[in-house]
Image: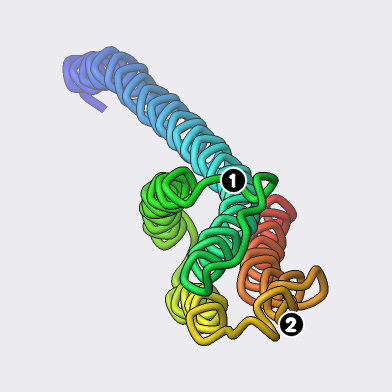
Amino acid sequence: MDVNLTHAIAANVTLDQSLWIPLISFSSGIIGALVGGAATYIIQRSNIKSNQFEKRKQRQEQVYSRLMGLEIMTDQLQTSMNEAYTLFALIRARERLHLPSRPELGKLEEKHRECNELAHELARNYQRLWETIGLIRVLFSPSEELEKLIKPFKPSMVKLREHRESIVSYYNDATISNVEIEPYAVSNKGAEEVIIKYVVDPFEALQKYLIDEIRAENDLH
């Protein structure tokens, strides 16, 4: 073989090697950067999802606790309303029948004012309840079961009002012979049945659903 040709081939091989080495190094650097970037992206995405889950979980727990507080407040307000309306109706009935006053019952004007104040407080309480239910619909996955548990709250409000109205109606129609007889709706047992059915039961059914959902999501993570 021609010596010059041999030297030329050797020179080309050397030149080719000198070009490939930096290209390989450059390519390796790009691949490494891409792999590193992808790993960082995955970690960041994982951290974001983890943070989002923790924030959502925290808000779910907060709305659950708020619902528990609203149950206690609703129970207290409805019980107080029943008592205030009963005394107001009884005092008014006794005055209508011209019976001797009973100082331990209080004055009609005081009971009327108390009824109005409690009614306003109850309205504010129900506003907070519906705001809380709105948050529940946002923070928890929509489902037919969830809506089924929310649905009874409006009818329950109506039933509780009707219960108070039945007490007032009883005393409006009372006579001297029965005005001092306590109707079943006013009795401890009758009042308790109404509170359990229209306050405790719907609240606790919804609370159970929410806590089960929170626990289920925790198990998945």
**Residue 58 percent location from the top left of the image:** 57, 37
Where disc 2 sits, the SS reads: loop
Image height of 70 relative to 28, above or below: below
Badge 2: residue crowd in 10 Å (few <14, some 14–19, many ≥20): few
Q: Which residue is mark 2?
A: 184
| Residue 189 placement, left or right of 84 | right
Where disc 1 sits, the SS reads: loop
Work out whether residue 186 or residue 47 is closer to the camera in this orientation and state it.
186
**Residue 203 percent location from the top left of the image:** 63, 64
Work out whether residue 131 or residue 193 is closer to the camera in this orientation and state it.
193
Count the marks: 2
Q: Quadrant of residue 12?
A: top left
For the N terminus, give its image quadrant: top left
- Residue furthest to the right in view is 189
Rendered residue at 61%/53% (across/down): 80
Q: Which mark is residue 106?
A: 1
| Residue 43 placement, left or right of 22 | right
The three-letter code of the residue at mark 2 reads: Tyr
| Residue 116 placement, left or right of 196 | left
Q: Is residue 159 visible?
A: no
Of labels 1 and 2, the one closer to you = 1
Image height of 142 relative to 172, above or below: above
Image height of 216 relative to 176, above or below: above
Q: Quadrant of residue 213?
A: bottom right
| Residue 43 placement, left or right of 64 | left
Please report contact status of discs 1 and 2: CB closer than 8 Å, yes or no: no
